[in-house]
Amino acid sequence: MGACYLSQLSSIIVQNAPFFLHKTCTELPKIKTHWFRQRQATLNFEGFEQCEFCAQYCSGFFYNIGGAWDMCIRCAKFADIIKCEGHQHFLFYDFKCNEKCNGCGTNNDIGAFRCGKCKFTLGFGCLTLPHSALHKIDQHMLNLTYHDDREQSYCDICEQERDPRLWYYSCSNCDTSAHTECVLGQFPFLKDGSTFSHYDHKHRHDLEFFRKAEGYPRCSYCGKLCQEEILKCKKSTCNYIVHCKCRNYQV
């Protein structure tokens, strides 16, 4: 297990199985003043935590800002004024902005990056999307794409209609296109074996995250086969296993 989910960062300088650190991660300040609300941010390690800015579940280092907000290190690397590939102008962070994000079409509850020259808004969720990703639908790397001139488009993964105004992943060689969430899945930034503390759910022991369960066992809560991401009890004598979506129910 590592301290982040950013394989593109600089080389590993600390490695002692089962834990390793990128050089960049070792240089993260333990305490700093963050531009968000100008509060003190403290670096913590979390096995399973949801970032309150990009809304993704992540494992690894998090910054807790002012004792109130948890920010993953993917979001923490951005300043309050940025330039991104999906827009030609600089964007500045507006704490009061609740307009829909131009990347995904959802509203931003915690503010968003805005353009001072045009009506463009971008939330942390789209700002931190990987620029490229692999998926079994295509043999090539899929690239994050910002514009689609077609009036009607469909996702090649879920086969549902895709809004051409929103960001998506595509392959120019094969003309493949897909929703960002279909390419990345529900938990793209969680590692197998990430620990979900028993303080954060209703089972009495710690749980471990896995993308697949061997043999497709039945969920301890809903009874359906576990064919997607699961949480499994870390205690070897306990057979508790649930779909991630069933984790908050008592069994």
Image (tube, rainbow, N blue to C red):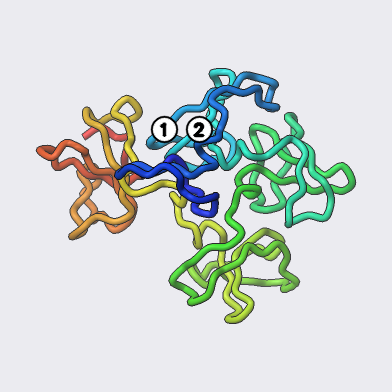
- Mark number, residue 46: 1
Tag 2: amino acid: Phe
Q: Of the residues under marks 1 and 2, which one precedes in the sequence?
A: 1
Q: Residue 78 versus residue 227: which sits nearer the camera?
A: 78
- Name the quarter where the N terminus is drawn: top left
Image: 152 above or below 107:
below
Q: Position of residue 224 (x, y in %)?
A: 24, 53
Residue 20 found in image quarter: top left
Q: Residue furthest front?
A: 13
Answer yes or no: is residue 160 visible: yes
Image: 9 above or below 247:
below
Q: Position of residue 192 (x, y in %)?
A: 33, 49
Q: Position of residue 109 (x, y in %)?
A: 64, 34
Image: 135 above or below 20:
below
Q: Residue at x 41, y 32 (%)?
A: 46
- Mark number, residue 62: 2
Q: What is the tally of numbered marks visible in this picture?
A: 2
Give the distance between the C-alpha atoms of the residues marked 1 and 2, in whole angstroms. Answer: 7 Å
Q: Residue at x 21, y 39 (%)?
A: 233
Q: Residue furthest bottom?
A: 174
Q: From the viewer's perspective, is 56 left or right of 92?
A: left
Q: Residue at x 39, y 37 (%)?
A: 48
Mark 1–mark 2 CB contact (< 8 Å): yes
Q: Position of residue 82 (x, y in %)?
A: 76, 43
Q: Residues within 10 Å of mark 2 (few under 14, many from 20)?
A: many
